[in-house]
């Protein structure tokens, strides 16, 4: 089924991004338990990320993400800020996102530093209540 999605140009644009991440975590079932087969079928956790990095399980995915640390932190920051503000990020949010990532860098991008930088950011401080 996934091969059919990748063969369809309309589907492949998203699946080429998502599938390698999902494949690398395929050994985990729906409740997070490790498995080596799906029914009778052996699980393959192999995939290739958009940058050409080959992954074959969670450890390889972690190494790939750590290799792109700032990009990973920027993406996580964007998602956290989206949640914190209750709206999608826009082009004018980019400077705040860069500022949050820069603020967290000296503390090795610790979660606490990233969260604190989000809370101190202008978009968070100036958000409107949704009442």
Image (spheres, grey):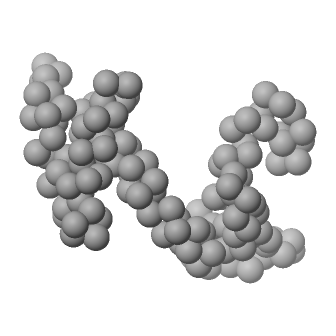
Q: How many marks?
A: 0
Q: Where is residue 94 in the image (x, y as percent from the top left)?
A: 34, 34
Vertical placement of residue 67 versus 126, above or below: below
Vertical placement of residue 98 versus 51, above or below: above
In the depicted view, which residue is nearer to us: 54 or 23?
54
Residue 32 visible in this rendered orientation of the protein: no
Q: Where is residue 6 in the image (x, y as percent from the top left)?
A: 84, 42
User: Would residue 112 be found to the left or right of residue 3 on screen?
Assistant: left
User: Would residue 103 be found to the left or right of residue 65 on screen?
Assistant: left
Q: Where is residue 128 in the image (x, y as percent from the top left)?
A: 13, 23
At a point 15% along the width and 40% down the height, the residue shown is 121
Vertical placement of residue 89 versus 2, above or below: above
At a point 43% along the width and 48% down the height, the residue shown is 75
User: Would residue 103 be found to the left or right of residue 97 on screen?
Assistant: left
Residue 69 visible in this rendered orientation of the protein: yes
In the depicted view, which residue is nearer to us: 99 or 38?
99
User: Would residue 25 be found to the left or right of residue 128 on screen?
Assistant: right
At a point 28% along the width and 35% down the height, the residue shown is 95
At a point 74% along the width and 80% down the height, the residue shown is 36
In the rendered image, which quarter is residue 5 located in?
Answer: top right
Q: Where is residue 72 in the image (x, y as percent from the top left)?
A: 45, 56
């Amino acid at each position: 089924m996934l091969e059919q999605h990748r063969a369809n140009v309309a589907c492949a644009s998203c699946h080429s991004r998502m599938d390698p991440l999902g494949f690398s975590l395929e050994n985990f079932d729906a409740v997070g338990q490790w498995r080596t087969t799906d029914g009778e079928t052996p699980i393959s956790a192999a995939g290739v990320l958009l940058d050409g990095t080959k992954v074959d399980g969670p450890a390889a995915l972690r190494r790939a993400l750590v290799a792109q640390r700032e990009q990973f932190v920027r993406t996580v920051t964007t998602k956290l800020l989206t949640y914190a503000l209750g709206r999608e990020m826009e082009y004018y949010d980019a400077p705040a996102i860069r500022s949050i990532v820069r603020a967290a860098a000296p503390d090795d991008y610790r979660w606490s530093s990233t969260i604190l930088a989000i809370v101190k950011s202008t978009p968070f401080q100036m958000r409107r209540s949704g009442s």
